[in-house]
Amino acid sequence: MYNDLKGQVAIVTGASSGLGKAIAKRFGAEKMKVVVNYLDQEKEAKDVVNEIHRLGGEAVAEQGDVSKEEDLDRLITSAHENFGSLDVMMNNAGIQTETYSHEMSLEEWNKVISVNLTGTFLGSTKAIAYMLDHQIKGSIINMSSVHEVVPWPYFVHYATSKGGMKLLTQTLALEYGGKGIRVNNIGPGAINTPINKEKFSNPEEREGVLSMIPMKEIGEPEQVASIAAFLASEQASYVTGCTLFVDGGMKLYPSFQAGRG
Ligand code: NAD
């Protein structure tokens, strides 16, 4: 737990499931005030709000599509009106689909880029504008992936969106470091969330994934949420422009583990 997080205000996008839900709950356990954003899972988002209250934090659920500028404005207004500040912007929402690249429609490409990359751009820059206006030395945390650096066949839109997030984050970190605003990425590997439910419930596919992880374990959402809390906290006060990978070693060329290469 990080004492300095108590009372701080955060927005977590895509917080009705998976990593966003685990992060919102962790922020609740840190006694933070959380805007729990959801796209269409209103009941699940309200459950997260109740859980945060139970943990000793404060929370409101707020619908919004991160690819829409006016929805991001509404989330920031909600943080301001409900809790009077915005200290931590957690851009977590993301989607993926699997398609041969040569068969991918422009619509499919645009959809993933607009949620993952443009949504993160909107969330980051609008939060930074608010922080500058209110002289807040805040923390922006973007949910990237190992695919920020590892190519991924059939997911060209997704890998491109996460690769783009690397330079988005580094550029913003450079631009606003002098104002005390830190911008970092989290790069998860294979984590046990709804996005992977189908893959992990198929024993053959699960084995295939495990063979790509040196630690031979699928990650749990709480192991990612603890990194979000760290990056939000004073303990990371000199950390900016970084991607903290949470992947059991997945991007360490696992095929080299058994041999000498
Ligand atoms: P998930 O499907 O459980 O969560 C994604 C969330 O984003 C959902 O709550 C969904 O409703 C929300 N969302 C989708 N489109 C949205 C939009 N337009 N506006 C607002 N919310 C929207 O999956 P997850 O694994 O928790 O994924 C969360 C993030 O973590 C994503 O950015 C994903 O790319 C990233 N990630 C996940 C893994 C993993 O193994 N689970 C690995 C690397 C990166």
Image: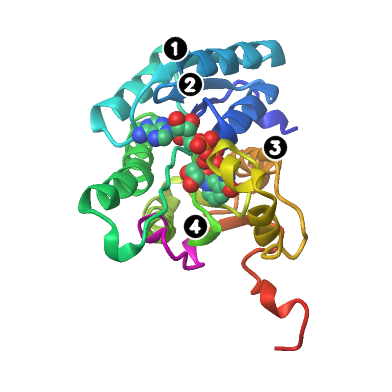
Mark 2 residue crowding within 10 angstroms, few (<14) / some (14–19) / many (20+): many
Q: Residues within 10 Å of mark 3 (few under 14, many from 20)?
A: some
* Numbered label attached to residue 82: 1
Q: Please name the residue shown 42% across and 60% down the image.
A: 159
Pick the front one: 29 or 6:
29
Is 176 on the left-hand or right-hand side of 183?
left
Tell whether position 229 is magenta: no
Choose between 45 and 4: the one closer to the eye: 45
Numbered disc 2: secondary structure: strand
Predominant SS of the magenta segment: loop
Which mark is on residue 48? Answer: none
Tell me the number on the disc at residue 241. Answer: 4
Viewer-nearest of discs 3 and 1: 3
> In the depicted view, which residue is nearer to us: 126 or 150?
150
Q: Any atom of ligand 1 within 8 Å of the CB at mark 2?
A: no
Q: Are marks 4 and 2 in contact (CB under 8 Å)?
A: no
Camera-near label (4 vs 3) is 3
What whole-number distance in Å separates the C-alpha atoms at marks 1 and 2? Answer: 9 Å
Count the labels in the image: 4
Q: Is residue 68 above or below residue 100?
A: above
Judge depth for marks 2 and 3 and give the one in front.
Answer: 3
Residue 222 circle label: 3
What residue type is disc 3 on?
Answer: Glu
Look at 52% across and 54% down and name the residue there.
Answer: 145
> Which type of secondary structure does the marked residue at label 4 adopt?
loop
Q: Which mark is residue 35?
A: 2
Q: Is residue 176 visible in this depiction of the protein?
A: yes
What amino acid type is highlighted by mark number 4? Gly
Magenta stretch bounds: 148-158
